[in-house]
């Protein structure tokens, strides 16, 4: 009766798990393909079920890589996008087929953060926005987005000029951060 019910992500472990166990072969294949190692000898020694698993994992790895490229292209064009904006872009993209879950997109973004290709910056509301760094130095973005203005609740009312009550020159937090 419950043939169409999918188990919860907490039970299956998500995309990086297979039959409830961490998919080590997926990680191994990703490492081999991303670092350009040739392991044809080891692949030829595999039996058929392992070969099919390897094929599945290679396909999955290239799919992840394709989604990473799509996320990178989107963030390069729309700097400072939220997770929901990126997910909606991928859902409406004709280059990605299948179900796109926000949790999977977050996993991909976290990989890009670890690779220092994307930077995460907090907003005043506590959410995160994501900035494409590409091959640039992420430490610069980390320092730049550490400015108190990005966490300020009244940043939208703050304007340059001495006549304004809220302006950068009168901001105690900005002066302290610069000082």
Image (cartoon, rainbow, N blue to C red):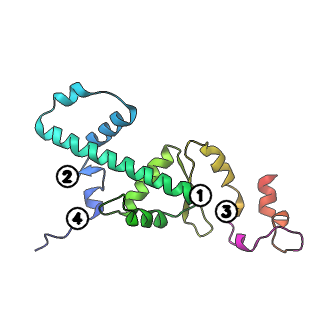
Circle 4 is placed at which residue position?
A: 7
Density class for disc 1 (Cα within 10 Å; few <14, some 14-19, many ≥20) is many
The residue where tag 2 is placed is 19
Q: Residues within 10 Å of mark 4 (few under 14, many from 20)?
A: few
For discs 3 and 4, the disc positioned in front in the rendered view: 3
* Mark earlier in primary sequence (3, 4): 4
Q: Which residues are magenta?
A: 151-163
Label 4 sits on a secondary structure element that is loop
Q: How far is mark 1 from mark 3, CA to CA?
A: 8 Å
**Residue 150: mark:** 3
Q: Are marks 3 and 4 in contact (CB under 8 Å)?
A: no
- Residue 166 falls in which quadrant of the image? bottom right
Earlier in the chain: of badge 2 and badge 1, it is 2
Q: CA distance from mark 3 to mark 4?
A: 39 Å
From the viewer's perspective, is 132 left or right of 14? Answer: right
Q: Which of marks 4 and 2 precedes in the sequence?
A: 4
Closer to the camera in the image, 71 or 156: 71
| Along the line of sight, the residue nearer the viewer: 88 or 165 | 88
Q: Earlier in the sequence, mark 1 or mark 3?
A: 1
Whether tag 1 and tag 3 are in contact, CB under 8 A, the answer is yes
């Amino acid at each position: 009766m419950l043939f169409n019910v999918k188990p919860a992500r907490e039970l299956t472990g998500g995309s990086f798990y297979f039959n409830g166990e961490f998919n080590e072969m997926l990680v191994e294949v990703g490492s081999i393909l991303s670092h350009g190692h040739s392991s044809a000898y080891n692949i030829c020694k595999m039996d058929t079920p392992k070969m099919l698993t390897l094929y599945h994992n290679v396909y999955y790895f290239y799919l992840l890589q394709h989604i990473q490229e799509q996320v990178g292209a989107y963030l390069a064009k729309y700097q400072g996008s939220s997770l929901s904006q990126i997910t909606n872009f991928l859902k409406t993209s004709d280059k990605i087929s299948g179900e796109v879950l926000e949790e999977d997109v977050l996993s991909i973004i976290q990989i890009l953060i670890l690779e220092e290709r994307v930077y995460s910056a907090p907003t005043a509301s506590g959410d995160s926005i994501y900035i494409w760094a590409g091959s640039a130095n992420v430490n610069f973005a980390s320092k730049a987005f550490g400015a108190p203005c990005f966490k300020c609740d009244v940043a939208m009312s703050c304007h340059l000029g001495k006549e304004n009550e809220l302006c950068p020159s009168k901001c105690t937090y900005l002066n302290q951060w610069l000082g």
